[in-house]
Structure formats: C-alpha cells, structure tokens
Amino acid sequence: MVVATGGDRLATELTPPLASTTTVNNYHTEQIGRVEATKDLTPTQLDDLLSEVKPYLDHETTKQWDANVNGILVRLITNSEHQMDFWMDNWWPGPNDDTILPHGFIYSIKDVPDKEPHAYYCPQRQTAVFINTEYYGQCKSWALGLAAQALERDFNTHSIHGACAEIDGQGIVLVAPTGTGKTTQVNKLFQHPKGRIIGDDWIYIKHPEDPDSDAPLTVTQPERSLYVRTENAEEEDWLRPIFENCKLENVPEDPNTCHHDDDEDCQINDHGTDFCLWGFGNSRAIIPREAMLGPDKVADQAPLNLVVLLRRDEDAPAEVWLDADEAVEVLQEGRYQIRPGAGPKEAWGTYDNEPWYNPYLLKPDHDAQAEFFRREVENSACVLLNTAPEGETIQRTYKRILNALEKA
C-alpha cells in the first residue's frame, strides 16, 4: 500500500492559472451521484463486509491519507486515484505521525465484481465503506458527517450544511437544500467590496459549554478547497476560466450528453469548446478558496450575525422573518424542491423533506440539532427567502440579504 503523507501537498501548489483553455482535466465517474446507502451496519456486519472487499485493495494501487476535518482525523483508504486526488486537494492534512490514530475511516473500493454500487456506515466503529462508486461528492459528504458525529457528541460543535460569507466584519450563514442558490448567493456576497468567503458547503459553530453564556458565536469551516458546481459559470462568466483550469468531475464533453432542452444552450455548440460546464447539474470543480478572487477575499472564521434560510416554493412569500421556534420548525421539516443533480431525474421538480437541510448527517440527533439552531437564531437574526417566485432574480435575493444584514 502506498501511504501519502500530509507533507506531499501544499495549498500553494493547488492554485491554478487563470488563463482560459479549450481542454480540461475532467474525470468521468460511472456513478454520477449518490448511490444507495445502508447507515446502520453492526460491527459484525462491517467486519464481514471488509473481509469480503478488502482483498481488492491491491498493494500497487491503494493509497491512504488522513484528512484533518476541524480537528477530527478521517482516513481514506482507496484504490480510486480520482477520489484520492480530490480528497488530498479538498482537506487540510492530518499530522504526519503514525502514532496519532484517526477518529474514523472511509474505505472506497472499486472494481469489486458482482457487487452493486453501495455505501455502508457503521456508527459504532465510525467507519464507512463505498463499493464500486468513485463519485467524490458522497465520499466528501460522508467524511463531514462522520466528523460531525464526534464534534457534536464530544465538543459541543454544530455541523451545518450551509455557506458563510463575511461583509465588513459581519457573518452571514446561508442554510438551504441543494439547488436553491446557496453557492450563487455566497459567491455574490464575497464579491462585495467588503466581502470575504468562509465556506460554501459546510460550516461549524462551536457553542459554549454553559448554555446561559452570552459569548458570541463564531463560524468556521473545514475545507481548504471548494467542491463547486460548474453550472454556476453559466450565470457568472468570471468563473469560467477558473473552472476550466481546475480539476473537474463529470463535465459533459459531448453535446449529446448535455441536459439542455436545445442545442442553443450548450457550451460545446455555442462557444466551440470540447466541454460544457453547465451541461449537467451535478458536474463539479475542486478549487482552492484563494483561487476564486485571491487570498484577501478568504477568511477562516466570522461572527454569527445573520442566518438566511433559502427555499424554492412557488406558493410561499419571498421574504419572512423568523424567530427561533419558527426557524427550527422550518428546518426540522426541511421541505425542499428536488433540483437537477440532487436526485433521480424523474423526481426533479417534485418536493421532498430533508430535516435540517442536511443529507450529510449519518446518525442525526434531531433534539440536538433543534437546540443548536435555536441558540444560533436567538444569538443572531433569521430571515427565510424564497428564490422561486416570478421576478425574484439572483440580484433581488442578494439585495434582500444585504438589507437583512443591515436590520440584523
């Protein structure tokens, strides 16, 4: 087995050039989204599964690398070069010390014969196993969910599927299901003259041990690189050369594989390139935060001043201010519209429920989630914005967020 150590990769090595190109570093995974999952494996079942599939981790192609996920060490062991490549770009490295053991493990094993693609998790052993799937998004999200279990239980730290930006020293947290515009809005916020990005997908809020403490809450994030939907480049042209020079996943390179209603929208036909960044709703780029607009536009933490919930619902008002109980009710229900890339194609446009807008939690404690969110809204302000109504443009939603920050 090849062991890749943290010192092998430096953040400065990850910053791509910004010149546009007509070819891309693009990897196509056979599974282009999350596979079916079993999240309640017993230790005995885990041992039986590993004894069956670990023989396919041959010495020549298997690597392992420890990620530092907000102080929780998660070790990936895989024979997928693609997943290890994205994994090492995504996270800060764990200590290069064999005497320090990881808190959890992820095995990702491809080329297992006669096995359907599937993901397994054993909560007692904090171990995940991916079989015959190289899609990085599920691997990354389960690493976050695995770390969240330890952070919530042992360190009073709330893990949120959300984004955070800071404007002139004030922190804005956006919590939303996939496809409602969370990344689009955080991109606009950190482009503000006084704006900086903290993270675009996952954030942490450490709560004081004393529940009566009036200490301010601080937002942090675990990732050194962002795993970003490349479809954002269709509306934000400045992202195109950045994405084109990053490592990509599942960007269509044939107009016949684009998910457009007509050829006019396809970047391959429209711009003469060999790929279409917005041809598939779940194609991704892995990009260092500082590569977006430079290191001065990046921050590692921010105070919590405003919580923004986003939704898409044609029948709901565009803006509603919520108190703590109302916010918890909305979040616990987690009603959302399934967007392209977030579920099977036949379900796109329908509604489902995702408590806390967080599909990453592997073993959710709903009472703890409710209490965390209640304290956070009590310590800040909360507004629910709807991006679906006619006339509610990206710019209009952005202005609503800025106005809400002034009120907060």
Image (cartoon, rainbow, N blue to C red):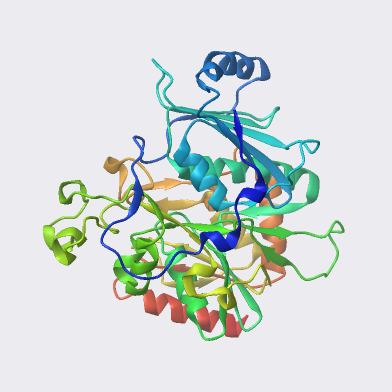
- The quarter in which the C terminus is drawn is bottom right
- The residue drawn where x is 72% and y is 37% is 102
- The residue drawn where x is 16% and y is 63% is 272
- The residue drawn where x is 38% and y is 47% is 342
Horizontal and vertical percent position of residue 338: 37, 49
Any part of residue 197 in sight: yes
Q: Is residue 371 above or below residue 302?
A: above
Horizontal and vertical percent position of residue 271: 18, 66
Q: Is residue 162 above or below residue 187?
A: above
Which image quarter: residue 12?
A: bottom right
- The quarter in which the N terminus is drawn is top right
Horizontal and vertical percent position of residue 177: 46, 55
- The residue drawn where x is 73% and y is 37% is 103
Nearest the eye: 137 or 184: 137
Q: Is residue 331 left or right of residue 159?
A: left
Count of number-bearing discs: 0
Horizontal and vertical percent position of residue 93: 66, 49
Q: Is residue 284 above or below residue 315?
A: above
Any part of residue 384 in sight: no
Nearest the eye: 395 or 92: 92
